[in-house]
Amino acid sequence: MTVQERRDPKLLKSGSRKARIAKGSGVQVTDVNKLIKQFEQMKQMMKMFNSGAIPGLSGENDERKGKRKK
């Protein structure tokens, strides 16, 4: 992958770029597609986690606040 592609994964929409990456890494294009999809899902999950959209996972530790779970 080029530096530009690593900085902006949206550039990987092109099939020729995916084919070049797959050929260079010795995997199939489907494997590259799976990796890109996993990356996008993780990116979305991290946004949800940081915004507090997932109940019970505010990113704060209750023990640091002096509260302990029983």
Image (spheres, helix red, strand yellow):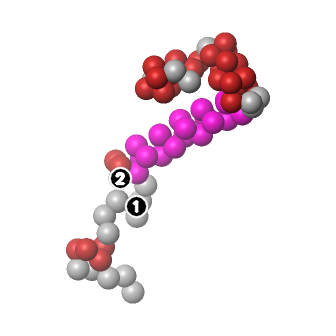
Few, some or many residues within 10 Å of mark 2 (<14, 14–19, 20+):
few
Seen in the image, is 57 located left or right of residue 14? left
Dot 2 or dot 1, earlier in sequence: 2
Three-letter code, disc 1: Leu
The part of the chain drawn in magenta is 31-49
Give the residue furthest to the bottom: 70
| Residue 57 sits above or below residue 47 on the image | below
Q: Identify residue for label 1.
A: 57
Q: Identify residue for label 2.
A: 52
Residue 70's label in the rendered image is none
Measured as percent of width and height from the top left, residue 6 is found at: 48, 27
Q: Residue at x 27, y 80 (%)?
A: 67
Seen in the image, is 1 located left or right of residue 47? right
Measured as percent of width and height from the top left, residue 50 is found at: 35, 49
Q: Residue at x 45, y 19 (%)?
A: 4
Seen in the image, is 1 located left or right of residue 56? right
Q: Is 60 contained in the magenta span?
A: no
